[in-house]
Structures are given as C-alpha cells and as structure tokens.
Image (tube, helix red, strand yellow):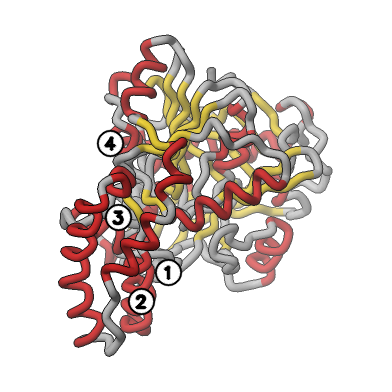
Amino acid sequence: MPALVLLGAQWGDEGKGKATDLLGGSVDYVVRYQGGNNAGHTVVVGDQKYALHLLPSGILSPECTPVIGNGVVVDPSVLFSELNGLNERGVDTSKLLISGNAHIITPYNVTVDKVTERFLGKRKIGTTGRGIGPTYADKINRVGIRIQDLYDESILTQKVEAALDGKNQLLTKVFNRRAIEAGKVVEELLSYADRLKPYVADTVLVLNRALEDDKVVLFEGGQGTLLDIDHGTYPFVTSSNPTAGGACTGAGVGPTKISRVIGILKAYTTRVGSGPFPTELFDEDGEALRRIGGERGVTTGRDRRCGWFDAVIARYATRVNGLTDFFLTKLDVLTGWEQIPVCVAYEIDGKRVEELPYSQTDFHHAKPVYETLPGWSEDITSAKSFSDLPKNAQNYVKALEEMSGAPISAIGVGPGRDETIEINSFL
C-alpha cells in the first residue's frame, strides 16, 4: 500500500485540509511533518466548518490515526486549546500521537519572535509572531527543548537556562526588555507534561511498522512549496521544509517508502505576508477573488494577496517535489469571468523567462506574461464528473495541467467535503 505526500504547490493556503480530509477515510495515518501553529487548514464537513492550525487534518476521520511528527514545532497551550475545541464539538481526539522528538515552542521563543519582527520595521519578514522561527533556530543551534525533555526536570532546567543565557542578553541589551526567568518557564512547561504524556510516542517506529504492515500513510505539509526555507522565495519563507523531502526528515521515513507526491494547486494564486508575487492583482479582479474565495488566513486572520494562476511556480513545484499528481482547488471561484488570464512566463529585463529565476533580484523584478483563456458562467458546484463541467472550465483545467507538468487527478468545485471531482484515484 502507498505512502503519500500531500503538500502545497504555491505559497500555501491552497486547500490542503480539504484534500487531506478527502483522503482521510481511506488512509490509516495522517502525519504533519513540519511547521507549527503558523499553518491553517479549513475543513468543511456537512454544515460544520473546522479550522485546524497544528493538528493533522486526519483528526476529523474516526478511522484515521493523526500524528504530529518530529519535524513539527509544538506550542502546548495552542495544542490543548485546539483539542479542547474539537472535543467540545464531539470529535474524538484520543488517537492522536505526538513525537517525543518534536520541539516545543517556549514562551521565550514567542517573545523573541515578536520583538525581533517589530525591531526590523520595514524590513520585517511578515512572520505570524508565534515563535516558530526562533524555535527552529534553537533546534539548529542545539539549544531547543523537545517534548521528551518534559519528563526529566533536571535536563529541562539545564536546557532552559542554557537557552536563556544568550536570549536574555539580547532582550535586555538590544531590545530593552526584561530578562525572562528560567524557573518560571520550567514551571510552565512542566505543567503540560501529564496531559501530553498519553499522546507521546516513538512515531518513527510506529510509522515504519505501519508501512511494513501495508497500512496507508499520508504525510501532510503545513505550508506551500514557495515558502520552503531552502526552495522558497527566501527570505520571505517559513523556517522548515514543506517540500516533499521534508516528509522524510520530519517523520523519519525513508524516501524509498514514498510512492506518490500530490501537489495542491489553487485555480488562481494567493499568498500571505511579505515577498514577491508576480501575478498579484491590485484591481477589482483581485478584490473579487478575495471576496468570492473567502481569502482570509485561517491562522493569521490577514487578508490574502490574490492574483491569477502562475504556471511558472506550478512547474517549479513539480520539479522540486517530484510531483506525481495535482489536486486543483477552488475552480468554482473563477465562475463568472468572461476571460481568465494565466501567467505562462515572466519578462525580466526585456527577456522572456519560462522557469523560476534562480536570482532573488530577478524574481523580484519579474513581470507576468499572460495568455487569456475563455471563462464560464455556469454554476459548477454540483458537478460530479469532469464531463459535468462547462466546456470552457474543462479547457481551463486541461491548459493548467499541460502548463504545470503533472496530471490533475482531482478538482475542488466547492468548499464541502463532497464537492470534489475525482478524475484519478490517489490510492
């Protein structure tokens, strides 16, 4: 049985939650392998809408075991708040597993994130201020706090004190803030230990044994390809690897176990936060996409920047992830446009460029080269098969598939769980 990776093929917010949830009833495990509560997925089940930030989308599928892998950074207070909210709505969260090697977002990580971003002023990255970047920095600098550290108070205390040695110098001497007391941090972290303990597991062992037993495991990225720390629009990126390779390191599963890599593409393009965005619209079309698409960040609450579909970044996502399939979402949002522009290339210094430029400077100055496709006015939300779509909608999908370099195997025609056209099975 397959191990599948499902990830965003743009700048995030493509509808990964809907895609994961659609597959959730057919898979045995859904694994978050990177990111933290800076991600957000909206899943609509019947007339119920669920906003998930840290938990895997598979938690809404009773047959599925949701897993938070070692590559995720966990804010315990956010985790418990999210679990409480689901429990109050009758969702069973008891099957959740959390890697003991996952790093904890501490209160001082959140503080450093906020004051640093404020200090940068106009040069700010546009972080969510939730401590994700500083937590990953601590991990790389080997002063991070892991969930397993909560069960050895002596080790926990030593690690918190070591981490605060440098941070308090920064806070007091650079940012003119009060020093943070290590004892209070340790006390707060220890208060989470007992409630976390039933969820903590050796998830690497669990997942590898599951695959050996022919279970289906779905690895879920938190952000999109263009936000990858190595392969995204650096420095306007996240602090981890949402690309397909991140699934291996973030969950502890070898690349030979991965059989399919599914990229989620929105039928147009959005991004949240700062950074270059060649097809961004500042006119009535941009406002219409934002309004009709409900383009507001699940986690950040910020309006998303909106633009036309960018085939250049779709091709790039296909290449760096080794995508085998696309799931195209929000096709219904484009209903009503007589003509729909699609970015097929960039113009940089008077030259046509059909692949993502290597240089940050070139990408910043890239101007979109558009081809215009005929639109459609018919309501498509009730379509159950590809042939049910209006001819122009079919042609639009086929054009995007050809430009992007991988087959489109499913299409979202509405926000609901059942408002999806499946062309080719992912399993």
Residue tagged 3: 357
* Crowd class of label 1 (few under 14; some 14 to 19; many from 20; radius 10 Å): many
| Residue with the mark numbered 4 | 249
Q: Residue at the location (70% across, 33% down)?
A: 420
Dots 2 and 1: beta carbons under 8 Å?
Answer: yes
Q: CA distance from mark 4 to mark 3?
A: 27 Å
The alpha-carbon separation of the residues under discs 1 and 4 comes to 25 Å
Q: Kindly check if marks 4 and 3 are in contact, taking CB atoms under 8 A apart as contact.
A: no
Q: Which residue is mark 1?
A: 129
Kindly identify the amino acid type of the residue bearing the numbered disc 2: Glu
The numbered disc on residue 117 is 2
The answer to which of marks 2 and 1 sits earlier in the sequence is 2
**Does residue 348 appear in the picture of this structure?**
no
Give the class, few, some or many, for how many residues have Cα within 10 Å of label 4's Cα (few <14, many ≥20). Answer: some
Kindly identify the amino acid type of the residue bearing the numbered disc 1.
Gly
Helix, strand, or loop for circle 3?
A: loop
Residue at 58% x, 45% y is: 15
Q: Nearer the viewer, mark 3 or mark 1?
A: 1
Which sits in the foreground, 217 or 341? Answer: 217
Q: Is residue 253 above or below residue 274?
A: above
Report whether 8 appears left or right of 422: left
For the point 59% across and 38% down, which residue is it? 328
Give the side of residue 267 with respect to residue 113, left or right. Answer: right
Point out the tag, 3 or 1, that comes first from the N-terminus. 1
Q: Nearer the viewer, mark 2 or mark 3?
A: 2
Which one is earlier in the sequence, the residue at label 2 or at label 3?
2
Answer above or below: position of 363 versus 197. below
Answer with left or right where residue 328 lies relative to residue 136: right
